[in-house]
Amino acid sequence: MARVEGHSFFPELLEPDGWVVDLGANQAGFSRYILERFDGRVLAVEPVPELFDRLPLTPRLTRSSRAVTGSGADVVLHMNPTRCASVMIPEDRAVPLEVAGSTLEQLLRLHAITRVTLLKMDIEGAELGVIFDTPDEVILRADQITVEFHDFLDP
């Protein structure tokens, strides 16, 4: 088992030319690790414009600037000054940022991805909504799923 950026997965299940979907790519640490060690492709999804602009431009990485949510509606991220952006928890000085939304199903369809060898979810409080609202047949298209739940953000 490998552990990267707080996410655990079985690297032997990653297939050549398979898709890794990195929801909440942030500064692309997870995506870069996958690209450096495996022959597959990565869809890096990051809604924060400053972070999206820093995603690498490389042939096996596809970038998408949107927030994946259960409903697919546009969302307001709270750009907190002392912790990560969140869809759920604003700090007193948080700056709201409206970003385009998408469901996981819409995102996969848009990029013609029919099978995912690894789905990584680090989407700042939207994880449970995506898991509960995504149809089972879409979730079952992922061979592995690694999720960071943001339960530590909610007092």
Image (tube, rainbow, N blue to C red):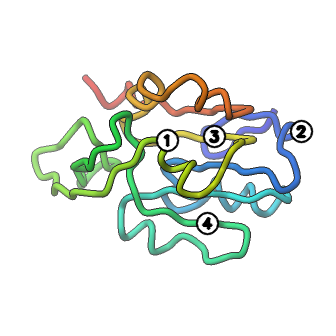
Quarter assignment of residue 145: top right
* Mark 4 residue type: Thr
In primary-sequence order, the first of circles 2 and 3 is 2
Residue at the far left: name it.
92
Horizontal side of 84 relative to 5 (left or right) equals left
Residue at 61%, 66% in the rendered image: 62
**CB within 8 Å, label 4 to label 1:** no
Quarter that holds the C terminus: top left
In primary-sequence order, the first of circles 3 and 4 is 4
Mark 4 → mark 2, Cα distance in angstroms: 22 Å
Image location (x, y in percent) of residue 49: 36, 68
Residue at 74%, 34% in the rendered image: 9
- The kind of secondary structure element at disc 4 is strand
- The residue that disc 1 covers is 104
How crowded is the residue under tag 1: few (<14 C-alpha within 10 Å), some, or many (20+)?
many
In primary-sequence order, the first of circles 4 and 1 is 4
